[in-house]
Image: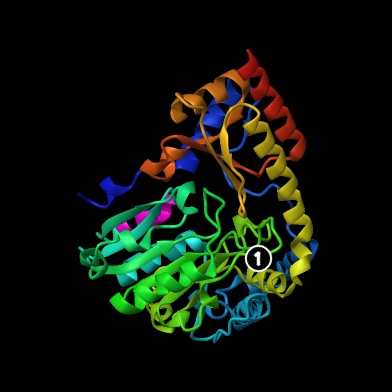
Amino acid sequence: MSRNDQSPPYISVQMMQLVQNARSQGLDVIDFTVGNPDLPPPRLLLDIVRDEIFQTANHRYPTGESSGTDEFRYAVAQRYQNVYGVELDPFREVIALNGSKEGAHYLSLTNIEPGDVVIVCEPGYSTYRYSAQIANAEIYSLSLSVDNGFLPDLASIPSSVLERTKLFYVNYPSNPLGATAPFDFYERLLDLAVKYGFCVCNDLAYGEIYYGANRPLSILNVPGAKEHAVEMNSLSKSFNVCGWRIGMLVGNAAVIAKVLAMKQNTDAGIFLPFQKAGAAALRLPVHALDDMRNTYRLRKEALVQGLRQTSFDVYDPEAGMFVWARVPQGSEAGYICEQLLTSCGIACIPGRAYGKSGDDYVRFSLSVPLEQIHIAMQRLNNLWKG
């Protein structure tokens, strides 16, 4: 099978087209499909971009090119020190990414030989699976369920699989589940990585969006984690700058060196004004994002309550910007999504898009204003009563 044959349509693109088609037919659609923040970036970031964009030098290739500017990498290292107590060498253990999606592709292409095993968790972000597929890896899937706290059962993995594993993707806080991982899970996972010699990658893209008192952990919080782990992170969701395509890969220096070598042949870095603003964002105090977290918390509470009132079995997320809901018993998720769109103008994503174990579920994004959530839940309630 060629790589082109392995390229499935991307679910967000498909859903955006469905929403556009519905709107073109006059339907008033409330769109819960894509995790695309509707909140503004911090004003400081906009001021920096406005000022820097008029500097002629900022329109040349960025300093540091693919690796990121010194300023940006220092800011990443300082953020990890301040927030997680993790020490990073900004020159060996940090590089800039054009978003964490790019990071998954580069990690697979630089760490996998055809036939190597890559372990992914389902339901989960589809990019990890696709990235492994284009590297011609053998994919081993672990099912996540509410019964196991949405954590993979590490003890269930056969030793014959672990012996051939080169890369293990995890994503906490999770898209689409909203679950977080405890310290002892990361410890057990890294113990396996040490024993069998594979690399673990955690995607921490939603690490700043959480609803309890405790911030989600970095996998690098585990002592010695940098020997076998890397972590992707992004400014997209934390600072509402998805369109800027700016993130980072941190952790194991050897893995990062391989990724950088490939990046140097495929991209020339991130627009300098975005890196300057990104560095400023990372230097902001942690409480600067409290209003954003509170906004998502209010949206989450309204959505969870509204769905539960109409027979959805809803997992109340600990973090992230999605709500994961089991459809009413006897229903089929794809049909429910179609019915919600055509009957009451509510667009959400069927859980099958995130793996086979998502068959009975749908995902709602919190990128919808609170007043629109209330309207959507009223429409849903009217549909169920009708």
Say which of 344 and 98 sits in front.
344
Residue at (60, 25) in percent of width and height: 23
Q: What colouring does the structure picture have? A: rainbow
Where does the image place residue 216, in percent across and percent down from the top left?
A: 61, 64
Q: Is residue 335 magenta?
A: no
Where does the image place residue 162, in percent across and percent down from the top left?
A: 27, 67
Instruction: Please name the residue that numbered disc 1 is placed on.
Output: 215
The type of residue carrying mark 1 is Arg
Majority secondary structure of magenta residues: helix
For residue 383, say whether it is visible: yes
Where does the image place residue 78, in percent across and percent down from the top left?
A: 65, 81
Quarter location, residue 367: top right
195 relative to 138, above or below: below
Residue at (52, 60) in percent of width and height: 172
For residue 50, say whether it is visible: no
In the rendered view, does 365 fall on the left or right side of 164? Answer: right
In the rendered view, does 272 fall on the left or right side of 288? Answer: left
In the rendered view, does 1 fall on the left or right side of 196? Answer: left
- Sort mark 1 into few (<14), some (14-19) or many (20+) by Cα contacts within 10 Å: some
Magenta range: 125-132
Residue at (39, 62) in percent of width and height: 105
